[in-house]
Amino acid sequence: MAGGPHATIFYEDLLKTSPVDIICLGEGEATVTDLAQCLTNEKTIENIPGIAFKKDEEIIKTTPRPMIKDLSSLPSYAWKKIHVTRYIYDETLTVLYSRGCPYRCVFCLSQKFLGEKTAHIVSGPGPP
C-alpha cells in the first residue's frame, strides 16, 4: 500500500508501474483502519472509500473519503515511541498540528492534496 501526495495524484501510474497493490487517496487515518479490518476479515475492498487498486488489469478508484472535520478527534502523538531528540534543533521542536500549508509555492502539491487550508505551525520546547 502507498499513500501521500504523490500516490494520491499519480495513483494510476503507481498501480501500473510498481508492485503497489492499493493506494490510499488523501488522508489515510480512517482509510487504513477500514482497510485493515476488511483484509483481516477477508472481505472485498471495493466498498472502502478513499482508495484505488488494481483488479486484474483494471484500475478501480472508489468514492472519495471526506476529510476529517475535527482533527482533535485523532489520537495524540505517541511521544514515548518517538525519539524526539532527533527532531530538536536549537532547543526547539516544531510540530505541524493541522493540515495544509500557509504558503502558495508553485511547485508544491499540498493544495491539490489537501485543499486550500491554512496550517498553524507551533514551535516550543517539545512534548510534555
Image (tube, rainbow, N blue to C red):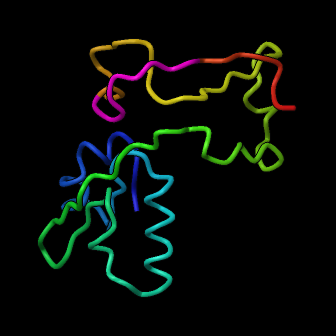
Residue 36 locus on image (x, y percent): 49, 72
Q: Residue at x 32, y 61 (%)?
A: 49
Q: In the picture, residue 12 is in which quadrant? A: bottom left
Q: Which residues are magenta?
A: 112-120
The relative height of residue 9 versus residue 37 in the rendered view (above or below) is above
Picture layout, residue 119 above or below residue 49: above
Residue 116, magenta (yes or no):
yes
Q: With 27 as the anchor, is 54 left or right in this view?
A: left
Residues 77 and 108: in front is 77
- Residue positioned 42% across, 46% down in the render: 27
Most extreme residue toward the left is 58
Q: Residue at x 29, y 19 (%)?
A: 107
- Give the total number of marks visible in the rendering: 0
| Location of residue 8 with respect to 103 vertically, above or below | below
Q: Foreground: 1 or 68?
A: 68
Using the rendered view, name the quadrant where residue 126 is placed: top right
In which quadrant of the rendered image does the N terminus lie?
bottom left
- Looking at the image, residue 125 sits to the left or right of residue 30; the answer is right
Toward which corner of the image does residue 26 lie, by quadrant?
top left
- Farthest bottom residue? 42
Instruction: Specify the principal SS of the magenta part.
Output: loop
Q: In the orientation shown, which residue stands out farthest toward the right?
A: 128
Q: Nearer the viewer, residue 32 or 56?
A: 32
- Residue 48 vs residue 124: left or right? left
Q: Is residue 98 left or right of residue 61?
A: right
Query: Residue 127 magenta-drawn?
Result: no
Q: Measuring from the top left, give residue 105's x and y in whole percent.
A: 33, 13
Which quadrant of the figure contains the C terminus? top right
* Residue at image point 32% right, 81% down: 44
